Structures are given as C-alpha cells and as structure tokens.
C-alpha cells in the first residue's frame, strides 16, 4: 500500500509557507537571507516538491517571527470531547513519511496521540529530542528503532516502549519495509505540544 494513498492531506505546508511569507511582504530571497536557507530550497518547499524537516521549519519560523505551529494549523478551540473520523485527521507529509494526528491537537488535556508512517531508512534526523511528560510507542507494522540515551530498542510489530520524554531520544526505520507506529505523549507541561518534535523526518531533499 502506498503510504501516501490516504484521504486528502489536510495540512499543506507549502501553501501555509507562501501565505505567511506574503503576509510579511517578503520575497523568497529576503526570507532566504533571514533564515539562512537558499532561495532555491525555499522555492522547492513552496511548490510542494519537498517536505521540510522540523529543523528547517524552525529556521523559517524564527525568520518570520512566528511559532512553528503556525505552519501546521489554524489553532482550533480546545474541546473536552474529541471525535475524529479517519477521513478528518490532520495529515502532515514528512520527507519519506506521514504524520497523522489522532485528536490531541484539539483536546483540552495533556495527552497527544498520533501515528507516523515511515519509509525504509527514514529517521527523525541527526539530533536527539526531549520534552516533558511521558512517551508510549506501539509498533503496528514493520520495525522501529528508538535510541534513548545510549541504549537502542528495536521494536517489531506488536512491541511497545514506554519512557520519560525528558530522556534524549530519536528514532528510525531500520528495516526494508514501511513502518507504522502509534505514539502517545502525556503528562507534558501545559502549553507544550511535544508531538511537534516528532514532525521531523530526516532532511528535505533540496538543492542548495
């Protein structure tokens, strides 16, 4: 199954980036100078030819003087009860993968469930991440390797992992097939949205 063969992706980063840049009356070259990225790299992202990693989006967000969350959604009102149909999930394309929100972005509580689908060899990038709260991982398909501190944990389909989010960690798909995993973040600090740390997926393929 093609991992991108889903209902329409509800978040279009290329469109959001263009709108945010134009709202500030910035040319692509001007944004490139402010962000340290090449104009060509930004153009490729705006045309939807590459999905940027979260580290790239942070550079752009700093240049635009906005929170990185501005790329992903218009902040919805939080709700006490959230019911999400499969066709209504927030779906954000990663480089060689897909992030799918499961309602935590709309829920008025300290819990964020989501799914990631990753092609073979895809990783969260070179650097570790950490956040407040707890992280639960359930591998649904393929293999997923988590590195927590200096220890590696290899999850096969059906395996689970639970740890403190404050421990430095990163992940990758070490296998030869597509991996899908359910990740649940809970107990984090109010105002923090740790699922955004997991929006990285290697570096975008762009020509600098």
Image (tube, grey):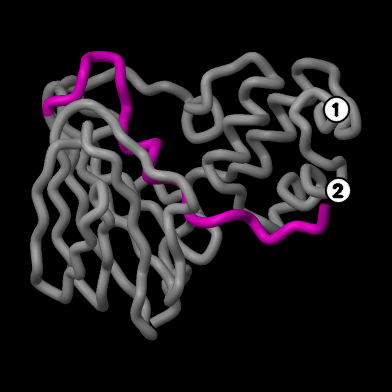
Q: Residue at x 13, y 48 (%)?
A: 136
Give left or right: position of 15 versus 122: right
Quick check: 2 above or below 109? below
Indicate the quadrant where residue 33 lies: top right
The secondary structure that dominates the magenta segment is loop
86 lies left or right of 55? left
Element under disc 1: helix
Which SS class for mark 2? helix
Task: Give the residue displayed 45% in from the left and 45% down from the top.
Answer: 127
In the figure, 101 relative to 30: above or below?
below
**Crowding near pointer 1: few (<14 within 10 Å), some, many (20+)?**
few
Query: Could you tell me residue 100's position as x and y percent?
Result: 34, 51
Q: Nearer the viewer, residue 73 or 26?
A: 26
Q: How many numbered discs sit on the rendered protein?
A: 2
- Report whether 104 appears left or right of 176: left
What segment carries the magenta color?
187-208
Query: At 39% from the left edge and 36% from the top edge, which residue is drawn?
Result: 196
- Horizontally, is 159 left or right of 77 in the view? left
The residue carrying mark 2 is 40
The foreground one among 112 and 59 is 59
Instruction: Judge by depth and name the residue closer to the eye, 110 or 9.
Output: 110
Q: Residue at x 9, y 68 (%)?
A: 159
The quarter of the displayed image where residue 185 is located: top left
Residue 202 visible (yes or no):
yes
3D distance between C-alphas at marks 2 and 1: 12 Å
Relative to 78, is 49 above or below? Answer: below
Residue 33 is tagged as 1
Please state, as top left, top right, bottom left or bottom right, where the N terminus lies in the image: bottom left
Seen as rendered, the residue at the extreme front is 150
Can residue 85 be seen here? The reply is no
Mark nearer the viewer, 2 or 1: 1
Q: Which mark is residue 143?
A: none
């Amino acid at each position: 199954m093609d991992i991108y063969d889903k209902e329409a992706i509800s978040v279009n980063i290329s469109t959001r980036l263009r709108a945010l840049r134009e709202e500030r009356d910035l040319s692509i070259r001007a944004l490139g100078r402010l962000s340290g990225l090449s104009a060509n790299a930004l153009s490729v992202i705006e045309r939807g030819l590459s999905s940027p990693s979260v580290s790239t989006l942070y550079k752009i967000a700093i240049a635009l003087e906005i929170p990185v969350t501005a790329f992903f959604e218009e902040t919805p009102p939080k709700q006490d009860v959230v019911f999400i149909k499969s066709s209504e999930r927030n779906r954000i394309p990663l480089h060689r993968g897909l992030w799918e929100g499961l309602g935590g972005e709309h829920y008025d509580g300290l819990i964020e469930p989501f799914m990631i689908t990753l092609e073979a060899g895809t990783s969260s990038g070179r650097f570790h991440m950490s956040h407040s709260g707890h992280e639960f991982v359930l591998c649904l398909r393929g293999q997923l390797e988590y590195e927590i501190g200096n220890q590696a944990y290899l999850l096969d389909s059906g395996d689970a992992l639970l740890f403190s989010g404050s421990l430095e960690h990163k992940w990758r798909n070490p296998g030869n097939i597509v991996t899908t995993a359910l990740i649940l973040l809970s107990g984090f600090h109010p105002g923090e949205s740790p699922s955004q740390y997991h929006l990285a997926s290697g570096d975008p393929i762009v020509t600098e």
